[in-house]
Amino acid sequence: MIYRPVSARLPVPAGLGRLVVLTTVFICAACGLVYELELVALASYLIGDSVTQASVVLSVMVFAMGIGSLLAKRLRRRAALGFAAVEALLALIGGLSAIALYACFAWFGQARPALVGFSLAIGVLIGAEVPLLMTLIQRIRRQDAGGAVADLFAADYVGALVGGLAFPFLLLPVLGQLTGALLTGAVNAVAGGALVLWLFRGDLSVRTRRLLIAANGLVLALLATCSALSGPFEKAARHAVYGDDVRVAVQSDVQEVVLTGGGGSGKPLSLFLDGRLRVNGDDEYRFHEALVHPAMDGPHRRALVLGGGDGLAVRELLRYGDLSSVTVVDVDAAVLRLASTDPDLAALNHGAFRDPRVRLVAADPFEWLRSRSAAEGPFDVVISDLPDPGITTSTKFYSQEFYGLVERRLAPGGRLAVHAGTLGARPHVFWTVDATVRSLGLYSTPYRVDGSGFSGGPDRVPVHSGHGEDWSFLLVSRERLPLELPRARPCLLSLTGGRLAAAGREAEHSREPGLLPSTLMHPRYAE
């Protein structure tokens, strides 16, 4: 039996009624896309590998939207009530999704099951919207199905555009992940409830109207309560993730920056970027000595540091009195500012950024290398102190194109030092970096040094594995160079010439031949 919608009793003319329905479609589409983007962004931060998380969220949601469209067929006879219920549920689930995802990560250490669950639930509800709205708009004024679908999808796509632009440029920078999702849920609840309770109130009994008002009021009250408690929640969740000694927590335009320990806490200073440990005050010197000093065996009047916004690589460079200038290019101005102003971090880097030889540039290293004027002259030493290639957003810094830009800025006899991950735990990633460098006709010498006992994600933190823990590096140049420390060098705490030579021999024994280079169009660091 074919269902044919009955004309609705409207409080306004049909033309205005259609406009109200299409406006609701616009608002709901904007909210739906915000939920999608919020899940992708938060999952990329909590879990890592943004490509994988985006693929999981989008594929699950599209699949779920198909299920929702089929389920909505059962609601067409009571389309107004069904739509109001769908929007109330969508507002509640979508609005609370960011808080729930963060809570799962903070207290249970696992966010992926929650990510899949919310993607599925939100997708089902979004998929149910259009069939129900199609029924409602046909009840206002019958028109051919093609015309009605065209109108609905036009409003839907324009709303998606507005939601897609509002998320990165308004909601995220102004309100943040949690409050932005909660506000979106409130807008969603108001739009869906207002459409049904005003325009289609004739379809509802008095008791049903009261139930819908109570349900939407409860949803709005829950979202408002969570918004009021978002500050304490974030603080509690942050302590669950980082411990009770969080001193600084800043959400910059690029990432979340957290400092723990230091001061009078009795604990070592630690710097986290987007949840990944980047600096541990107990043993960072071993990492930075190994990264910087082998590259200083030769001319080193001018140096360039790519990344290294914490100032610790610069500290090691400044220990050479004949160094005339250091340019630091880091994407996050907040990290550069923190390394200059935080007393504990500035003490750890020995006030490196206050040295007149240091020039700070807040810019994407890739874009800076592309746009940099050749009149600035070449660099004798380039230190690549960038996030691990296993992090999706960093793969471009380990591409053939990136190293080509760096090679153009090297002076004759210049040297490039690259932190390329951990050879013990992820040798394929390390040797892919090596193959990428060599594909440009450069020579590379690998070496690895023992890391700490700390565990962490793919970054400069050694990852515990059955193969040991290490930090692994490449010394790169246009000519084959010996792996040595400068004869005239400052006193080092952990690195000696003998240890460096042994580190090189140990790394070379694990070489993986025949790997292809990584490019912007074909990144090869996913494992």
Image: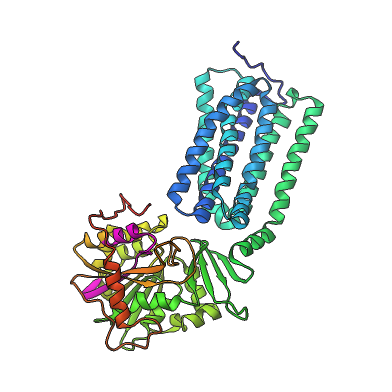
Q: Position of residue 328 (x, y in %)?
A: 38, 73
Q: Position of residue 478 (x, y in %)?
A: 19, 70
Q: Is 450 rendered above or below residue 108?
A: below
Q: Is residue 524 visible?
A: yes
Q: Position of residue 252 (x, y in %)?
A: 52, 63
Residue 18 is covered by the magenta coloring: no
Front residue of 389 and 34: 389
Q: Is 204 rendered above or below residue 296?
A: above
Residue at x 43% of width, y 65% of height: 331
Residue 417 is covered by the magenta coloring: yes
With 67 as the anchor, is 50 left or right in this view?
left
Which quadrant of the rendered structure holds the N terminus?
Answer: top right
- Residue placed farthest to the top in the image? 1
Front residue of 526 and 316: 526
Front residue of 418 and 228: 418
Residue at x 30% of width, y 58% of height: 432
Residue 473 location, quadrant: bottom left
Q: Is 3 rendered above or below residue 341?
A: above
Residue 304 location, quadrant: bottom left
With 497 as the anchor, is 412 left or right in this view?
left
Q: State how many labels appear.
A: 0
Q: Position of residue 336 (x, y in %)?
A: 47, 72
Q: Which residues are magenta?
A: 410-434
Residue 290 location, quadrant: bottom left
Q: Is residue 155 visible?
A: no
